[in-house]
Amino acid sequence: MKELLKKIRKYEIQIRKAVNNHMHGDFHSVFKGSGLEFDDVRSYQYGDDVRTIDWNVSAKGHGTFVKTFKEEKEQNVFFILDVSASQEIGKNTRKIDIAREICAVLALSAVKDNGSVGLICFSDQKEAYIKPDKGMRHAYQMIGSLFNLTPVSIKTDLQKSLKFTLTMLKKKSVVIFISDFIDEGYNTNLSALAHKHDLVVIHLNDPREIKFPNLGIIPLYDKETKKTIWVNSSSSKFREKINKGYAENKLKLEQFCRRNGANYLWVNTNEDYLSKLVQLFKIRRMRSKR
């Protein structure tokens, strides 16, 4: 555990340095985007964004008024982490290993900027829930709980986890959803989460899920259903069907995030996720300046 924490701290320092050196700004801005709250109204002035007009106040007939906002000094960062059996896939590094590390790195970064961090781990049920709180001690306790967790269930239910989060999170937050998104029927709740909060979707995958290898007739074991089926992986039609299905699902999720104003990040288990996180933060910082 000591070596792991050393690695996580190293990554967190690298991310902060990269953001500050190459983006010429405060690292705190990577968690901005939804950190504005209503302050007051004032008279409309030439050049004001028409989307800020308060129509209810303006309708009283005393002129046109716009809403003003102030930046929240504290930001809630909440993680939704998929710990179902499909997350254990990986040749050298499993998807769940990458998910835990990303969660830990970003949690440390958030609390260092005076943010609150919380976590829900889910399968087809709530496996762990840690209420958002501040401070390094809280962050390390959360990280310890995350790495020591042994899920009770092996199945997946994204819709249920999203419903729990929507019910539980009252304050507008940065929500970081980490999963392989191998499930169906969750789009409605994911859209609601994106419109209510500042959503970041981190889509994990293993290389063999993108390009199925030609291994002849082989057994495939589904960890979630505990069933084994035999398939002919030498069939080009079979491999094309598998590869095409994954590519289509990836594209649909990416387009869904774009339509609903969420950030989308795709991470492969065989690549360095650090540079991808830095690029994501760059995009978020640019958005926060608009």
Image (cartoon, rainbow, N blue to C red):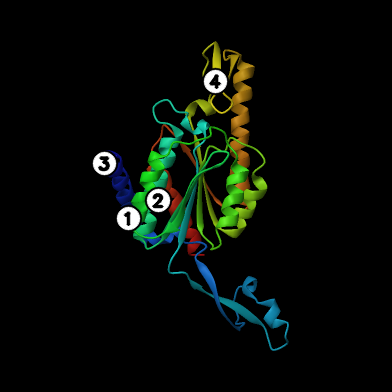
Residue type, mark 1 in image:
Arg
Q: Bin the neighbour count of mark 2 within 10 Å (Cα to Cα): few under 14, some 14-19, many 20 and up.
A: many
> Residue 212: where, in percent of width, then height?
54, 22
For marks 3 and 1, give the CA distance. Answer: 15 Å
In the rendered structure, which disc, 2 or 4, sits on the residue that comes first in sequence?
A: 2
In the figure, is residue 182 to the left or right of 174? right
Q: CA distance from mark 2 to mark 3?
A: 18 Å
Q: Of tags 2 and 4, which is closer to the observer?
A: 4
* Vertical placement of residue 132 versus 96, above or below: below
Question: Label 1: few (<14), some or many (≥20) within 10 Å?
Answer: few
Please name the amino acid that badge 2 sits on. Leu
* Mark 2 secondary-structure assignment: helix
> Residue 35: which disc?
none
Q: Nearer the viewer, mark 1 or mark 4?
A: 1
Of label 2 and label 1, which has the lower sequence position?
A: 2
Residue with the mark numbered 3: 2
Q: Which residue is mark 1?
A: 137
Residue at screen point 39% across, 27% down: 92
Residue 107, placed above or below residue 69: above
Q: Place residue 146 in its image quadrant.
A: top left
Mark 1 residue element: helix
Q: Position of residue 161 (x, y in %)?
A: 58, 46
Earlier sequence position, callout 3 versus callout 4 = 3
User: Which corner quadrant holds the N terminus?
Assistant: top left
Examine the rendering and report whether any part of residue 189 can be seen: yes
What's under tag 4, amino acid-wise? Tyr
Check disc 4 and report the residue beneath it: 221
Q: CA distance from mark 2 to mark 1?
A: 15 Å
Residue 255 visible in this rendered orientation of the protein: no
For disc 2, the marked residue is 106
Whether 92 is drawn above or below 264: the answer is above
